[in-house]
């Protein structure tokens, strides 16, 4: 019996070789099998952005990145006709408007494809997203304000504004979606905070809320806005008047979240007409007192403004701190560091104008059209001694394309003259060497800060996969 | 040995002074008559008169009786027993008032004291008119045949004895009974004649019961005298002689017995009980007929049905007999109720009888095989087999506990049981996860699901349900159809059961106890077992349990061709069950067997060429080829129409039951580890690959090594193939093939090891020693390390108990409302964004297997929705709404851009936002069934899960929110309207007039297919079952 099971003399006999060959062939065969692990396709694109309506008593012009972009005015769904005021103007001062159907407007715009276009609108405008940003310039009787058109966020902080009787600060909530949206606004003041106000915004409507309805009489306001449902873009427009005298107007750009290292890239120190007073508005929204340290970066170097080396903020209370003896030959950057997450913005005021400069995120790229403005571009790394290396491409109003590489330590300003386009690229690593940029725009009516941040970022959303596993139960 | 002197006979007791007339009836009884005549002659109390009737015997019966000095009266061959007795008594007129008739059969030998005991008992009890002895077997004289007889309500002859019960004096008490057998029965002649003797309609069989019943209703009694003993051959009942009585249609004893049993019940029972008794007779007859058909005894089946039919066709006999009895009846017929067997006793005895039959069959086979095993087992085995221990003297046996604990297999079972309890702690309760969906509450739900032609899953499916669904439902009968409990038990106990099954199979395979135990441990504690448990691979668990049985078949060897037809069909059935739970296994099996069939054909090519292929296949010479064809085709046919559907969509062969789940790649499978989530790490190597290498080197293991290696190779080759189906997408799970390869290799290689070990002991150290040591080390490491790993990682198992439903409670609550809303669920799992359409409930067992792809319109709409591409309009909500999707549920909503996208799309209204997820209501979503009249007014109509019924008040269009299928019909006042596919891919019905409508899904084809499948299954089961033996074929020694 045992003889039947005796091993062959040679281990490497033909059977073992056959086995190895079979396994080899099967392994090789496995490489030939269709192995598409994922049928998930992705769709990339820039979300649509919303530009604000004409707020205040002046006019608003919007600079689109391209005239090939589809855009429409946001009107209530029930409106019988969709109208838009379209202005093909190179200068806001020469703007003239005419009513056309939106379809015609789009068709008209497309005739001049690939050329920058500036539109003026009484209604908020929905613009198809693109890599370049769109922005709006509001010119009212008292001053100017600029803001980047945005796709909106679900959680935003507006650091700025007041609810005094001289203020006509308005929160514009634009629901560009097709369903009713809900937002909750909470105002923080210097002593307390308001009860959350729930705001319902119907589809295709821009709902406007006066800041004084949230916290009447409060001089220092920080507004927290949470979008609970719907696609909502929010703009806070501040306008001050004293009697019939306008004291200026501006958009207050939002911050997405409190942080421990905030950079307010541009704060002017003086204007040609009148002296400037500067103040810093701070809020520690957490539950504990927060220590804050402010550093100013400028063309003259970095320094700590007097009394700003160590500030203690009470939790949940807005603090306005004016700067004294703040002198610099160039605009400045404020770097605000806290030991807890904080919010900060700076306001610069003259006798007839004011402007809010908000803390803003770093960028790696920004592009926009400028309809003949002469912006002063402030670039900063947001840290003392940290390098800047940015490539600035622009086109002059005469159509000359120019390029400039800006290399500096911590801070730089450039005056480009009247330009039609602007394109800024951070040539360093965005994570190790961040770049913050703001444009200071001056017109005959006043000045304003335009944060050079993309209004919409490239979003890649995977097409979902039909899979019954989505119905499987979840763990405890 | 019969008692020589019954204990109750007292020598000093005078024998009663009564006249005893013995009547001996003979019919072809020469085989038994010599002993019968001697027994009559040897009676301690001799008979006073004796006469014999020979009913036309063809043997020497008449001569034998005459030679004994007994007068023989010849009679016609078709004369019944009662008529024969009447004829005899007519020859011997009554002599005294206390005369007794002693009825004797030619195959019944009374003990020498039998008559004396009967007379003694009768003399002391004047109310007793009939007495009978205790009847024992003719050959096995300790075998108790009767201690009185009664009749069950279904006509069965009831003795109250267990099958082959031995007489140990356990029934030795004098007692009144309903009746006694006419064999050696002592009857008072005046009473007998007063009642008219035996019923002339009962020529044979049941005349005793009938007479006993009539005695009782006439106010007399029947007594069993256990001290009187007679030995009865039951020649007629056991079909040892021809049944020639005139009433015996076709000379079939069973037909006559059943007919007479029914007759006795119907003529003696109270009138009001007749309908109930008739019903019982009919149902029992049908049940017995079916049982006989299963036992391949169609003649007996025909007897059962024929007996009932014959009786119901002759009602006049019954009415006449009832009138005759009425004149002699003093007491109600229910007076014998105390002698009727209780129903639970009948059931218990019936069950025990069935178990005895089955066990006898199995035990007989086991004994045969075990004999083979013992003859080939090693003498060096330190462990005695069970049978060896069984035959140890009782006095030397240890206590049962010590006996059990000394057996290593018991210890192993205890250790494994403890481990499994610890490992399965998280799986106590309703389990789900991985590939396993939630089990319905009842296994019967699965049976219902299987016969449905339309499956209400997602947007509906008309695909054929896989046959594992009803198999699982039937299996849940073990837990009284509590399916969750059954599934839980399966996941908890599969390793233990597979350990036990493999151990038994290994023993039958010829391994000694130790090696069988080692093989069982390697198999039952392998990585594939724990991976299957952790991933919820229900199908593979069933394969794990059944695969060891496949080893004994040796499916790819020539043994199939040399096997019996019964075994061939049994193999086909087993493979069909395996294939139902693993389509991949079915595919491999079919291809492999087809290859062998072609090979066989090639070998017989000369014969095939001389005849045509078909005439050769159906000739007797191709018996082996026919068997090969059966084992190749039968599983495929039994699994139709599912198997046909898979053939039309061949990628479906690569899908195992349940949700597809990503599993391991080629290298993992090479090491016998199926891989994927919940699989042991790859370094936890299983010895199967080493076993394969070992087997391939040994010539005698060529077939098994080739089979196993081929399975492993196929597993490797297809492991990376990504296939879509069952509502998901994943690479091929090859756990079932790995399992089968292990099941094939383990016993073969261990058998080799067991035989090779003694040889190695006598040899100097060499390669063989090292190789065996390596095999042993890896094996021990595998079956120790794998369960420990499973214990340590049990909390990460995909299959867990108590997992929560994802659906919001209020949405689930709407499931059974007439609107029957659907919900689009969007969820991120493992970095992928998934979506599915739910009907408000969890995903249940079998539903993934029945699901089909969602319509393209839905896919496009969901893509638009998620990517925010529908910002300008409400097209998405219109499409979703048209399909009856009333809600969108975003589970664990963390992606704000997605929320904004849905918020921004038209037609969706937020309904709720909780920590679990966000819910939107789809505006203007339709119900499952909606009617739109010609003016455009719509109305949601009440609908069931599949069908619906109602009224429409005007002409218009009926819209059904289900994926289009040509099987949908509407009957409008009986007129059929076929469904039309509308622009959304939905079903609509043009309604041209008001009326009553019925919505249904046509299932005629499925019913026909299932009927064919059922018929084929029945035939296969009958063919696979052991054949019953006719009583005439059973050796008389076994019966009496």
Image (cartoon, rainbow, N blue to C red):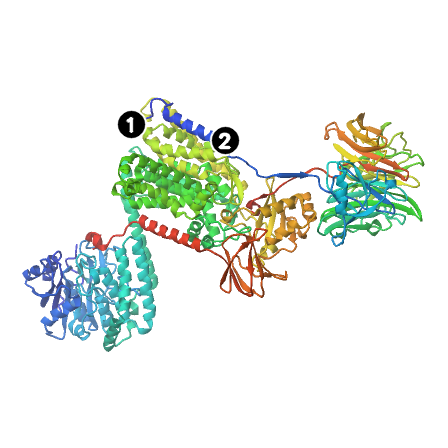
| Residue at 23% from the left image edge and 68% from the top image edge | B210
Asked whether residue A473 is in view, the answer is no
Q: Earlier in the sequence, mark 1 or mark 2?
A: 1
- Report the quarter where the C terminus of chain B lies: bottom left
- Report the quarter where the N terminus of chain B lies: bottom left
| Residue at 51% from the left image edge and 65% from the top image edge | B973
Q: Which mark is residue B726?
A: none
Asked whether residue A367 is in view, the answer is yes
The part of the image, by quadrant, that contains residue A150 is top right
Residue B353 horizontal side relative to residue B228, left or right: right
Q: Which mark is residue A3?
A: 1
Is A102 placed above or below A25 here?
below
Task: Find disc 2 in the rendering and name its residue.
Answer: A31
Where's residue B513, x and y in %? Answer: 34, 38
Residue A217 horizontal side relative to residue B641, left or right: right
Q: Nearer the viewer, residue A120 or B801?
A: A120
Residue B776 horizontal side relative to residue A238, left or right: left
Is A270 placed above or below B918 here?
above
Q: CA distance from mark 1 to mark 2?
A: 41 Å
Mark 1 neighbour class, 10 Å CA radius: few under 14, some 14 to 19, many 20 or more: few
**Mark 1 vs mark 2: in front:** 2
Q: Chain of mark 1?
A: A
**Number of residue marks:** 2
Q: Are marks 1 and 2 on the same chain?
A: yes
Q: Nearer the viewer, residue B856 or B1015?
A: B856
Q: Nearer the viewer, residue B911 or B544?
A: B911
Where's residue B440, x and y in %? Answer: 50, 53
Q: Chain of mark 2?
A: A
Q: Nearer the viewer, residue B456 or B173?
A: B456
């Amino acid at each position: 019996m045992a003889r039947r099971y005796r091993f062959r003399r040679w281990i490497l006999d033909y059977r073992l070789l056959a086995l190895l060959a079979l396994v080899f062939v099967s392994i090789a065969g496995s490489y030939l099998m269709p192995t598409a692990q994922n049928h998930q396709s992705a769709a990339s694109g820039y979300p649509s952005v919303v530009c604000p309506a004409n707020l205040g008593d002046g006019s608003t012009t919007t600079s689109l990145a391209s005239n090939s972009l589809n855009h429409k005015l946001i009107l209530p769904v029930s409106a019988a006709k969709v109208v838009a005021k379209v202005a093909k103007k190179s200068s806001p001062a020469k703007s003239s408007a005419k009513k056309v159907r939106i379809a015609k407007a789009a068709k008209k715009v497309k005739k001049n494809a690939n050329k920058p276009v500036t539109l003026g609108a009484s209604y908020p405008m929905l613009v198809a997203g693109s890599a370049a940003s769109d922005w709006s310039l509001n010119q009212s009787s008292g001053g100017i304000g600029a803001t980047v058109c945005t796709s909106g966020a679900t959680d935003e902080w507006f650091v700025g504004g007041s609810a005094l009787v001289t203020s006509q600060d308005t929160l514009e909530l634009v629901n560009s979606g097709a369903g009713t949206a809900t937002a909750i606004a909470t105002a923080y003041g210097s002593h307390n905070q308001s009860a959350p106000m729930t705001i319902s915004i119907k589809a295709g409507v821009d709902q406007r809320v006066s800041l004084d309805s949230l916290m009447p009489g409060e001089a220092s306001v920080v507004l927290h806005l949470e979008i609970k449902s719907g696609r909502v873009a929010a703009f806070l427009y501040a306008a001050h008047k004293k009697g019939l005298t306008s004291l200026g107007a501006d958009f207050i750009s939002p911050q997405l979240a409190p942080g421990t290292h905030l950079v307010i890239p541009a704060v002017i120190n003086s204007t040609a007409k009148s002296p400037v007073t500067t103040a810093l508005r701070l809020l520690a929204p957490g539950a504990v007192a927060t220590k804050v340290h402010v550093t100013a970066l400028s063309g003259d170097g970095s320094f700590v403004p007097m009394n700003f080396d160590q500030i203690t903020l009470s939790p949940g209370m807005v603090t306005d701190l004016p700067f004294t003896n703040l002198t610099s030959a160039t605009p400045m950057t404020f770097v605000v560091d806290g030991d807890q997450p904080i919010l900060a913005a700076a306001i610069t005021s003259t006798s007839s104008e004011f402007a809010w400069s908000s803390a803003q995120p770093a960028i790696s790229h920004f592009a926009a059209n400028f309809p003949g403005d002469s912006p002063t571009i402030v670039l900063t790394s947001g840290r003392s001694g940290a390098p800047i290396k940015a490539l600035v491409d622009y086109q002059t109003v005469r159509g000359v394309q120019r390029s400039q590489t800006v290399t500096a330590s911590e801070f730089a300003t450039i005056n480009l003259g009247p330009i039609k386009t602007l394109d800024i690229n951070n040539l360093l690593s965005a994570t190790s060497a961040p770049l913050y940029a703001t444009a200071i725009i001056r017109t005959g009516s006043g000045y304003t800060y335009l944060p050079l941040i993309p209004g919409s970022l490239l979003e890649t959303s995977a097409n979902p996969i039909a899979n019954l596993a989505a119905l499987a139960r979840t763990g405890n | 040995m019969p008692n020589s002197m019954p204990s109750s006979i007292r020598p000093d007791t005078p024998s009663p002074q009564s006249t005893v007339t013995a009547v001996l009836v003979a019919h072809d009884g020469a085989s038994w008559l010599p002993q019968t005549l001697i027994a009559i002659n040897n009676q301690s109390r001799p008979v006073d008169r004796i006469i014999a009737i020979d009913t036309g015997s063809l043997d020497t019966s008449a001569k034998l009786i005459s030679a004994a000095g007994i007068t023989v009266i010849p009679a016609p061959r078709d004369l019944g027993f009662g008529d024969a007795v009447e004829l005899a008594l007519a020859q011997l007129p009554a002599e005294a008032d206390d005369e007794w008739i002693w009825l004797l059969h030619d195959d019944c030998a009374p003990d020498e004291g039998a008559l004396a005991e009967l007379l003694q008992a009768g003399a002391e009890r004047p109310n007793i008119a009939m007495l009978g002895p205790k009847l024992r077997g003719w050959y096995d004289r300790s075998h108790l045949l009767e201690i009185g007889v009664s009749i069950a309500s279904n006509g069965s002859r009831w003795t109250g004895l267990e099958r082959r019960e031995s007489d140990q004096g356990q029934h030795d008490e004098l007692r009144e009974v309903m009746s006694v057998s006419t064999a050696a029965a002592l009857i008072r002649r005046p009473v007998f004649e007063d009642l008219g003797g035996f019923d002339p309609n009962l020529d044979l069989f049941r005349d005793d019961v009938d007479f006993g019943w009539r005695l009782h209703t006439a106010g007399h009694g029947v007594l069993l005298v256990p001290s009187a003993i007679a030995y009865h051959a039951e020649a007629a009942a056991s079909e040892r002689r021809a049944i020639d009585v005139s009433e015996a249609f076709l000379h079939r004893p069973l037909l006559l017995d059943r007919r007479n049993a029914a007759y006795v019940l119907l003529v003696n029972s109270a009138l009001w009980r007749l309908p109930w008794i008739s019903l019982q007779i009919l149902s029992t007859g049908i049940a017995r007929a079916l049982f006989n058909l299963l036992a391949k005894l169609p003649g007996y089946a025909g007897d059962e049905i024929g007996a009932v039919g014959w009786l119901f066709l002759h009602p006049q006999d019954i009415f006449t007999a009832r009138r005759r009895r009425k004149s002699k009846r003093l007491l109600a017929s229910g007076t014998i109720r105390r002698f009727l067997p209780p129903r639970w006793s009948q059931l218990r005895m019936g069950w025990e009888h069935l178990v005895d039959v089955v066990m006898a069959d199995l035990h007989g086979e086991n004994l045969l095989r075990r004999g083979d095993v013992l003859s080939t087992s090693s003498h060096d085995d330190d462990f005695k087999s069970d049978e060896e221990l069984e035959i140890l003297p009782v006095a030397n046996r240890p206590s049962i506990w010590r006996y059990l604990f000394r057996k290593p297999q018991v210890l192993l079972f205890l250790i494994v049981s403890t481990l499994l309890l610890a490992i399965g702690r998280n799986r106590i309760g309703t389990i789900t996860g991985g590939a396993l969906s939630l089990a319905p509450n009842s296994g019967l739900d699965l049976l219902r699901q299987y016969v449905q032609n339309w499956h209400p899953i997602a947007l509906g499916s008309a695909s054929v349900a896989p046959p594992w669904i009803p198999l699982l439902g039937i299996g849940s009968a073990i837990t009284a159809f509590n399916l969750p409990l059954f599934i839980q038990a399966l996941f908890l106990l599969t390793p233990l059961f597979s350990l036990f099954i493999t151990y038994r199979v290994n023993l039958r395979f010829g391994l000694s106890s130790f090696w069988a135990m080692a093989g069982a441990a390697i198999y039952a504690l392998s990585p594939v077992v724990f991976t299957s448990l952790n991933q919820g691979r229900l199908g593979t668990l069933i394969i794990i349990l059944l695969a060891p049985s496949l080893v004994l078949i040796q499916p790819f060897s020539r043994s199939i061709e040399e096997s019996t037809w019964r075994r061939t069909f049994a193999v086909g059935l087993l493979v069909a069950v395996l294939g139902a739970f693993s389509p991949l296994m079915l595919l491999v099996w079919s291809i492999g067997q087809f290859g062998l069939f072609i090979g066989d054909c090639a070998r017989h090519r000369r014969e095939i060429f001389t005849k045509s292929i078909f005439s050769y296949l159906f000739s007797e010479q191709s018996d082996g080829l026919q068997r090969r064809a059966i084992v190749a085709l039968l599983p495929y046919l039994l699994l139709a129409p599912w198997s046909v559907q898979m053939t039309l969509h061949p990628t479906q062969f690569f899908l195992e039951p349940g949700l597809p789940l990503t599993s391991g790649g080629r290298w993992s499978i090479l090491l016998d580890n199926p891989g994927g989530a919940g699989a042991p790490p790859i370094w936890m190597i299983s010895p199967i690959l080493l076993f394969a290498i070992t087997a391939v080197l040994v010539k005698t293991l060529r077939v098994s090594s080739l089979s196993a290696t081929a399975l492993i190779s196929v597993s490797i080759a297809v492991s990376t193939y990504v296939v879509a189906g069952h509502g998901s997408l994943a690479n091929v799970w090859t756990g079932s093939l790995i399992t089968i390869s292990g099941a094939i290799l383990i016993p073969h290689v261990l058998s080799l090891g067991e035989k090779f070990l003694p040889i190695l002991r006598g040899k100097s150290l060499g390669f063989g020693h090292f190789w065996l040591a390596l095999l042993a080390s890896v094996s021990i490491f595998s079956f120790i390390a794998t369960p420990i790993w499973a214990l340590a990682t049990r909390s990460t198992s995909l299959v867990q108990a108590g997992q929560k439903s994802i659906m919001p409670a209020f949405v689930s609550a709407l499931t059974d409302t007439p609107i029957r809303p659907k919900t689009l669920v969007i969820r991120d799992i493992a970095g992928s964004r998934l979506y599915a359409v739910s009907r408000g409930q969890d995903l249940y067992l079998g539903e993934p297997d029945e699901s089909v792809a969602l319509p393209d319109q839905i896919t496009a709409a969901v893509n638009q929705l998620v990517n925010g591409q529908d910002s300008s309009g409400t097209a998405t909500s219109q499409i979703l709404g048209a399909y009856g999707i009333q809600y969108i549920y975003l589970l664990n909503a963390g992606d704000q851009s997605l929320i904004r996208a849905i918020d921004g799309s038209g037609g969706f209204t937020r309904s709720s936002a909780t920590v679990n997820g966000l819910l939107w209501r789809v505006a203007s979503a339709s119900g499952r069934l909606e009617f739109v009249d010609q003016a455009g007014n719509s109305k949601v109509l009440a609908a069931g899960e599949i069908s619906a019924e109602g009224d429409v008040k005007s002409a218009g269009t009926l819209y059904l929110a289900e994926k289009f299928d040509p099987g949908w019909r509407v009957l409008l006042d009986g007129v059929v309207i076929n469904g039309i596919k509308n622009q959304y891919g939905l079903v609509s019905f043009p309604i041209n007039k008001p009326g009553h409508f019925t919505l249904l899904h046509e299932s005629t084809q499925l019913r026909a297919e299932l009927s064919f499948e059922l018929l084929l299954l029945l035939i296969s089961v009958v063919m696979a079952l052991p054949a019953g033996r006719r009583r005439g074929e059973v050796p008389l020694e076994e019966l009496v």
